[in-house]
Image: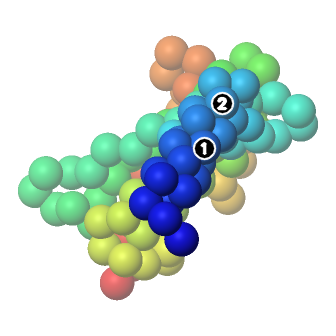
Amino acid sequence: MGMSKVMMRIGLSIMAAAGLAGCGLVDNGTAVQYGGMTFKGASEGNKADRAQFVSTGGPVSASIDGASRAAAYQGTVYCINVLGTSDVDWQIGPDTPQGQMPVARDDVVFRGRCVE
């Protein structure tokens, strides 16, 4: 295969990926689809103990179930990225009764520890 064909395939692949990202079919991995809606999330580790983290998901006003799934997803992704495990010991997490889940700025807030 000639160099121009390789460059053309690379260019087309980049354009296709950019097009899909622009229409919302692909995102940067921080969103969860639930019930036809998109729920954003984030996670942050404890600087003193990287196994400890806080993850968030929302908006709770749209669906606490969707927000909770987004927060759980973010916590699991955090553990995979930081410690290479998907095992999480949740202090506040998906099994917490909905009425006891802390909410801040329309996001549910989970706390957990990655289990090595």
Up/down of 85 relative to 43, above or below? below
Q: Secondary structure at mark 2?
A: helix
Q: Secondary structure at mark 1?
A: helix
Q: Residue at x 89, y 37 (%)?
A: 35
Residue 99 seen by the camera:
no
* Left or right: residue 73 compared with residue 82: right
Instruction: Residue 90: give x, y in percent of width and height.
Output: 50, 62
Considering every residue shown, the one lying at the far left of the view is: 48
- Mark 1 or mark 2, whichever is nearer to me: 1
Quick one: 66 or 113, which is closer to the camera? 66
Residue 70 seen by the camera:
yes
Which mark is drawn over residue 12? 1
Instruction: Residue 41: give x, y in percent of width and height.
Output: 53, 36
Q: Residue at x 45, y 38 (%)?
A: 42
The amino acid at mark 1 is Leu
Q: Quadrant of the C terminus?
A: bottom left
The answer to which image quadrant residue 84 occupies is bottom left
Q: Quadrant of the N terminus?
A: bottom right
* Left or right: residue 87 compared with residue 24: left
Up/down of 85 relative to 36, above or below? below
CA distance separating discs 1 and 2: 10 Å
Q: Residue at x 68, y 47 (%)?
A: 69
Give the mark, 1 or 2, whose residue is nearer the N terminus. 1
Instruction: Residue 40: give x, y in percent of width and height.
Output: 59, 32
Instruction: Residue 62: give x, y in percent of width and height.
Output: 78, 21
The amino acid at mark 2 is Gly
Quick one: 95 or 8, which is closer to the camera? 8
Quick one: 19 or 91, which is closer to the camera? 19
Which mark is drawn over residue 2? none
Up/down of 49 relative to 42, above or below? below
Q: Which residue is mark 2?
A: 19
Q: Residues within 10 Å of mark 2 (few under 14, many from 20)?
A: few
